[in-house]
Amino acid sequence: MKTLIITFIALSLSILTGCQTVRVKEQVSTAPIGGYVLPQTHYTYPNSNVTPLGPVKARAMVEGTLHDFPNISKAISDAINKAIRKSGGDLLINTTVGGNLNTYSKFENGKMKVRYEAFVEVQGTAAKMEIGKQKLR
């Protein structure tokens, strides 16, 4: 009876231990993106009135792998367009662009796996543009 109980416990432990997954640690590194100022995000026509609407901020994120690096330019464009839509304006003026590129790497099944996440934030002043309405002197 004692041998049967010990065998049952040993068999149960081996089955339960075999069903668990082993966690693989990911190594994370961060690098800055951007850090520059755009005087305006879109072309303003010479004979137009540009009226500031107020401050606005927006974020965008793109992901990628070692073979398919994230398109950071697309993330910047997405963040700018999101800020313009949110404000109801036509463009942003005095805009700062910044963000982070996070790299996650781990060694799994004999192979190095790398993935990226790029977070971009734009912050500026939303503006409305009226084309051809400026009074010339």
Image (spheres, rainbow, N blue to C red):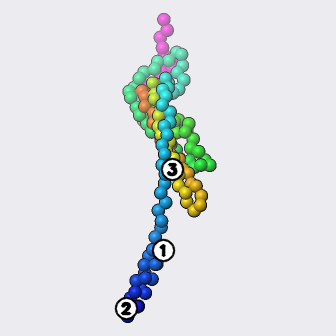
Q: What's the CA distance linking mark 3 and mark 2?
A: 50 Å
| Along the viewing direction, whichever of 35 and 75 lies nearer the viewer | 35
- Residue reaching furthest right? 67
Q: Earlier in the sequence, mark 1 or mark 3?
A: 1
First-in-chain label (2 vs 1): 2
Q: In the rendered structure, which segment of residues is drawn in magenta?
A: 127-137
The residue indicated by pointer 3 is 104
* Spatial CA span between label 1 and label 3: 27 Å
Residue in the image at 46% along x and 70% along y? 20
Q: Secondary structure at mark 2?
A: helix
Q: Is residue 27 above or below residue 51?
A: below
Residue identifier under label 1: 18
Q: CA distance from mark 2 to mark 1?
A: 24 Å
Question: Eyeballing the image, is 104 above or below 20?
Answer: above
Amino acid on which the number 1 mark rests in the picture: Gly
Residue at the spot of label 2: 2
